[in-house]
Amino acid sequence: MTWKSEQLSSNELIIREALLTTGRLPKHVAVIMDGNGRWAQERGMLRVEGHKEGMESVREAVKLSSQLDIKYLTLYAFSLENWKRPAREVRFLMGLLESYLKKEVAELHANNVRIATIGKTNALPKPVQKVLQKAIEHTAGNDGLTLTLALSYGGRWDIVRAVQMIALDVRRGKVSPEDLTEETMRSYLSTGGMPDPDLMIRTSGEMRLSNYLLWESAYTEIYVTNELWPSFRREEYYKALSDYTLRERRFGQTSDQLRTATVGPNNTSKPTTMERILDAFR
Ligand code: FPP
């Protein structure tokens, strides 16, 4: 049975319907999965147990994104700075990643998920690079959810890498400095082929970007929840999405300009029933 044909509870059907009716679900959701260590420590467990439990939240987020036809989910699974963690924890995380890809690529493929990565992946252990490459190739033809794993990733690293490649192309005469635009820059980033994230979720209450998608998040809506990542399950994801559908994205314009452009000058724009359901759910 595929994820989309699964039977949902009546509560879930209502919230799903409300979300879909708004027509405002994000195309691209980026997540900073924070708080695994604290989740474990609060329970007197080892930090790595938190990562293990966090994997279940990864599964749920992937599945729900796919069920809601969200096109891109980008997970911050391992930052460049995470290499400084104790070797044992790094080894554990790499093992978790490897077994996730090995065990679940078939299910991901059956659900039309395309796997991609961003980051300095040549720094990953060779066996991890191998399964990653295999998973990417195996799912390359899928056109449902694109699940991008940010691995050994840093936003500044990606920007510097893009600038280096632009400089090389300038030297080769392929690009002229006068013609450089934001679009050119975007195309050199490792996120080049995807839209900017509409929504960035950060768990564990920390109010920072932690070097994640720095260029791409210029106009991203940020949702911070106090839930720790291992506790961020379906209901929490629904809450984040509901919150997002009620945001007004102005991209530098005024509210009046937006209303006039979308619904005409005299529209009073009363909340719909569905918007009221979502508001209550938040
Ligand atoms: C942050 O929690 C989380 C990480 C550094 C790793 C996230 C990885 C996973 C959820 C599992 C692997 C993911 C995939 C996609 C295979 P933390 O350890 O910084 O928690 P703390 O802030 O409470 O210490």
Image (cartoon, rainbow, N blue to C red):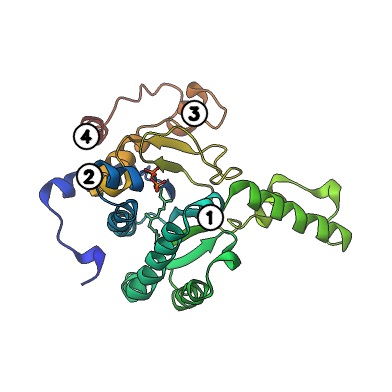
What whole-number distance in Å separates the C-alpha atoms at marks 2 and 3? Answer: 48 Å
Do we see residue 144 in this rendering? Answer: no
Circle nearer the N terminus (2, 1)? 2
Position above or below: 22 against 166: above
Q: CA distance from mark 3 to mark 4?
A: 26 Å
Neighbor class of circle 2 (other Cα within 10 Å; few <14, some 14-19, many 20+) is few
Kind of residue at badge 2: Arg
Residue positioned 78% across, 48% down in the render = 180
| Three-letter residue code for mark 3 | Leu
Choose the circle earlier in sequence order: 3 or 4.
Answer: 3
Q: Nearer the viewer, mark 3 or mark 4?
A: 4
Residue bearing mark 2: 43
User: Which residue lies at the image location 29% right of the left edge and 44% below the top edge?
Assistant: 41
Q: Is 31 above or below relative to 205?
A: below
Residue receiving disc 3: 258
Among numbered discs 4 and 1, the one appearing first in the sequence: 1
Residue 215, image quadrant: top right
Measure the alpha-carbon separation of dots 4 and 1.
Answer: 39 Å
Can you tell which mark lies on residue 213?
none
Q: Which residue is mark 4?
A: 281
User: SS class of the residue under badge 2?
Assistant: loop
Vertical placement of residue 108 versus 186, above or below? below
> Mark 4 or mark 2, which is nearer to you?
2
- Residue 200: x percent and y percent? 44, 42
Q: Residue at x 23, y 30 (%)?
A: 276
Tell me the CA gap for discs 1 and 3. Answer: 44 Å
Q: Which mark is residue 83?
A: 1
| Secondary structure at numbered mark 3 | helix
Q: Earlier in the sequence, mark 2 or mark 3?
A: 2
- Regarding mark 1 in the picture, which secondary structure is present there? helix
Residue at 37% x, 37% y is: 244
Q: Are there few (<14), some (14-19), or many (20+) residues within 10 Å of tag 4?
A: few
